[in-house]
Image: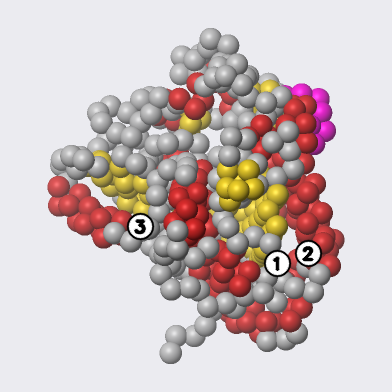
Amino acid sequence: MRRVGAVLLALVGALAGAEEARTNVLLICVDDLRPELACFGADHIHSPNIDRLASEGRPFFRHYVQAPTCGASRYTLLTGCYGPAGNGALMGRAKRLGEGREVPKSLPGWFRRAGYQTVSVGKVSHHPGGLGGADWDDPGEVEMPGDWVRSSMPCGPWRHPRGAMHGLADGEVRGAAGTMAVMQAKDVPDSGYPDGLITEAAVGELRRLAAGDEPFFLAVGLIRPHLPFGAPEKYYDIYRNKPLPPVAHPEKPEGRSTWQRSGEFRNYDLGGRDPNTDPEFALEVRRHYAACVSYADAQVGKLLAALEESGSAGRTVVVLWGDHGWHLGERAVWGKHTLFEESLRAPLVVRAPGMNAPGSVSRAVVETIDLFPTLCGLAGLAAPAGLDGRSLVPQLEDPTAPGHEAVSYTRSAATLRTAGQRLVLHRGDGFLELYDDSVDGGTPNVAAERPEDAARLRKRLEARLGSRR
């Protein structure tokens, strides 16, 4: 009989004691965060708090999301299943649930039924706070009904979650397309931008939960570095006049691909400049994005400090998860919504009490859907039937443990990532792209030259996609 991993044994042993010793979960979701962090090899980025978390946990260098858009990616995080490709994925699930139809179980709902206090602050599901309506504050439209004990989004001067989602300093709310600056750095405290308020509220929730008698599942969703790239000036000062590494493969790909025109980025005021033809402007955009990363990192630091101060860190699993990547000029794209590596590879760090070899990197190919069964295993809970993900406990026990293929999709195409190849299948006519490069680094489409490889991977992709719900 295969022995249970040391990580799982240590946690299950703790669970065998008193009820108050049950394992907690702190899930930190960060929007549009590339794996461009010092702990992931980008030493030009100032990310000391995430770096410390990685040194104490397991950074997954080859973690892939299921969709390069917020709502669909968060659906897979929160259900452990492949699903719809659009931002309305969770609202669609809520509608089906209300109609009495079968839907995938939810991660917070599963923990709540197991006796956990499940609390969400900020952008965890697609809408910050988890509500729909014109301003995302309608209590009659709930993205995840019955799954959170509490779900909140502090809005301050931004007035409502929609305003905070795209807010700039001191309550500025995005209006018509093209009227809000794409980047900003103002001399304000952290609370001068929305993530400061999210963090303050989350720290308060953490203290209350840690003082209680029940185990907790606290999910905190940070908005930056999502557009617009605005952060307190002290974080921009880290990068002011600082050179950054050149952009890898900045040319638009030749031939057919999932390339897109950066429409989300161009909905902001660019001052008439184009980063694809204006290197100085491109560099400034990248500096402001980096400032947003450092701002988000500072909020992560506050959460981790509050966890330590609460006395709960030793029995809390901490997960830092990016919902997808973001192009900063690679392939002449400024945004997401492609099936290239830059959109689909995102940071993932898991820190579990008693884990082996903390700080050692896993280079296994893994997926976002793997987090649901992983957290169940670490908390000593049986996972629900029907999950598409696979537990990462083996990689937490042994950083050299192998992973598995990763599936991602948009409405118009789907992709399979293996350890050394990426296949992209276009819907409709079945056009194939095949890249034979483990980092998808600008190699040409070789599907025509390697039809047997393409056909073999297509069958595997289609078999995996058959489980989408």
> At label 2, which amino acid type do we have?
Leu
Is 263 in the magenta? no
Residue stretch rendered in magenta on the structure: 185-192
> At label 1, which amino acid type do we have?
Gln
Spatial separation of the CA atoms under disc 2 and disc 3 = 35 Å
Tag 2 and tag 3, C-beta contact below 8 Å: no
Tag 1 and tag 2, C-beta contact below 8 Å: yes
Give how far across and how far down residue 204 sits, in percent: 82, 54
Quarter that holds the N terminus = bottom left
Q: Identify which residue is drawn at 75% across, 70% down.
A: 314
Residue 297 lies, with reference to residue 387, above or below; the image says above
Which residue is labeled 3 in the image? Answer: 468
Point out which mark residue 117 bears.
1
Relative to the observer, which residue lies in front, 208 or 231? Answer: 208
Label 3 CA crowd tier, 10 Å (few <14, some 14–19, many 20+) = few
Q: Looking at this view, name the residue that lies furthest to the top.
A: 272
Q: Can you tell which quarter of the image residue 153 is in? A: top right
**Which badge, 2 or 3, comes first in the chain's sequence?**
2
Q: Secondary structure at mark 2?
A: helix
